[in-house]
Amino acid sequence: MKYTEGAPIRDTKAPAGPIEERWEKRKFSARLVNPANKRKLNVIVVGTGLAGGSAAATLGELGYNVTSFCYQDSPRRAHSIAAQGGINAAKNYRGDGDSIYRLFYDTVKGGDFRARESNVYRLAQVSVNIIDQAVAQGVPFAREYGGLLDTRSFGGAQVSRTFYARGQTGQQLLLGAYQALERQIAAGTVTMHTRHEMLDVIVSDGRARGVIVRDMVTGEIERHLADAVVLATGGYGNVFFLSTNAKGCNTTAIWRAHERGAYFANPCYTQIHPTCIPVSGDYQSKLTLMSESLRNDGRVWVPLRKNDERAPGDIPEDERDYYLERIYPAFGNLVPRDIASRAAKNVCDEGRGVGPGGLGVYLDFRDAINRLGRDAVEKKYGNLFEMYERITGENPYDVPMRIYPAVHYTMGGLWVDYDLQSTIPGLFVIGEANFSDHGANRLGASALMQGLADGYFVLPTTIGDYLADGPFGEVDEEAVAEAEIKVRSKIDRLLAVNGTRTPDSFHRELGKLMWDYCGMERTEESLRKALERIPELRQEFWENVKVSGTAEELNQVLERAGRVADFFDLAELMCLDALVRTESCGGHFRAESQDADGEALRDDENFAHVSAWERTPDGPVLHKEPLEYEYVKMTQRSYK
């Protein structure tokens, strides 16, 4: 796949000056919209997870007319509900040395120095407000005996800054945002459309002015217009078919925006989560995450001996390899996710993995139960242990959990500036749908932090600066009609193929190809193989996919087919981005670029930039945004 290199791109919205003053400076310089004018302005928010739900609720509270869309039957079913372990905030309630600067430093380092300093520092600043907001909403965070909010540790940090609600933190935070959203729906400031899928962005006079959606129950194609559009549609990990994402998670919204001119940044940055329940058979359609918080008290180990088939309880202590504690003594089991995932892969590749196929390692709570007592462990992790037992039939109080890395979060997404605005004026992108805050690897408990920071605090300020020029007048009818025709044409094309293979069969084949060739480890050879095979598989899809039913009804086969078609195009760009980036960094591990210890080896001289891809009729164009570090020195990451 050929590409050309275009002009560099820069974020012109981030203020200069001391980093701790930049967000305050931007907030003050952002133009305001008076209450009477807000009532004249319309904003569309697509997605109702933590980012989208909090944004729609906050914009409604501010007085804008908000139209919200989700493809689920309720905003409460957004995938944010699946987050388990916690949310980071630099409150320093433990008095263990945490601070806004330390959270900033840990996040920049955890992202392998591939994130913007300004964005990450703002995230650390806003984190302290998120906890207060959530507590005010009644989110039942865990508390210590005296009533103070409790915290625990997560990978990549040596302090306890992660607030949690057992293993249901995402669910509880989402219910808080949902209640705020429902309040605005009742007040009439937010109009909610469930079971609607966004299929295109309407761009008129160079601005994002609306969306084309499909009513997933009736099949009706609808047009909705506004003065600005906000995408909060999550990540694209399901390109791998097997991932920890809900089956409905997809790339369609951001990919269709990319086709309209929004740059796509760092698509190759995929996070592999180290603590997932291993694959158990070909029948599976998704994988289940076990929270990283379990690594607080669970010890990760494998047998010292290769192909050791003894039960874990029969393997004596001196024949066990607690490899994370051995290799990384400073952080032990709490190394960042990319480090822990590659370490698990390495010991399994050596033949020391456990379980079916040797693709697993033990996460053992024996010592914690002996030290703390079963009741204390149950209070922290009880629902997670119960979930594991229901899925595997094994009781983790009695035998160690078996875990293995799996595709989880995607750090890439649509390129946005400091204001969270894409390269299409009026199109804002928040949460996992953008690329902005995590660099090449997301630290655990930072996704919830970013989603709520964007939705509650950042976007409501920065979008006002854009909307101060509105309302933007009539939308060009030709632009609306063209977008609607494009959507209908794609649907008609899918229905017309009438082949012999299901969309899921193509998705499964694409996912395996991506895991094998662009998964936990990438090489030039594997990526070139993928770039050779993906176009062939895509062509076969368009010649042989079978989409039953019609467009004028509830048709989940049609929904899946449209999403798989977009995954083919995204997969190709992911592999190209991974091929061009010949360094290793964070979740992007090129086997050709590692140090003597097998750790990721960055190339700061040539790759200290964001890769922002533009889609053109002549092929992809790469625009590079230089990353400059004033406050954190770029060094080889070490957790030893």
Image (cartoon, rainbow, N blue to C red):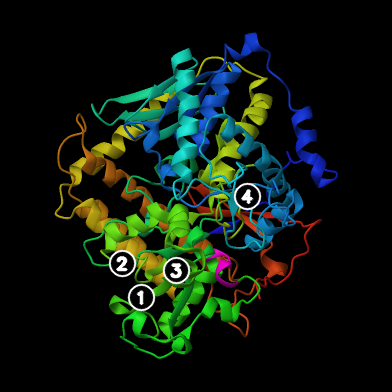
First of labels 3, 1 by sequence position = 1
Residue 420 visible in the current orientation:
no
First of labels 2, 1 by sequence position = 2
Residue 78 among magenta residues = no
Q: Write the residue at 82% across / 40% down.
A: 21
Q: Residue furthest top?
A: 36
Give the residues drawn in magenta, as a range. 332-337
Identify residue for label 1: 359
**What is the C-alpha distance between the residues marked 1 and 4?**
32 Å
Residue 189: % across, % down: 50, 16
Q: Which mark is residue 365?
A: 3
First of labels 3, 2 by sequence position = 2
Q: Which mark is residue 279?
A: 2
Secondary structure, mark 1, is: loop
Judge whether 551 appears above or below 590 on screen: above
Q: Nearer the viewer, mark 3 or mark 2?
A: 3
Secondary structure, mark 4, is: loop
Q: Quadrant of residue 394?
A: bottom left
Q: Residues within 10 Å of mark 4 (few under 14, many from 20)?
A: many
Q: Are the residues flagged by discs 2 and 1 in contact, CB closer than 8 Å?
A: yes
**What is the C-alpha distance between the residues marked 3 and 1?**
20 Å
**What is the C-alpha distance between the residues marked 4 and 3?**
33 Å
First of labels 1, 4 by sequence position = 1
Secondary structure, mark 2, is: loop
Amino acid type, label 4: Asp
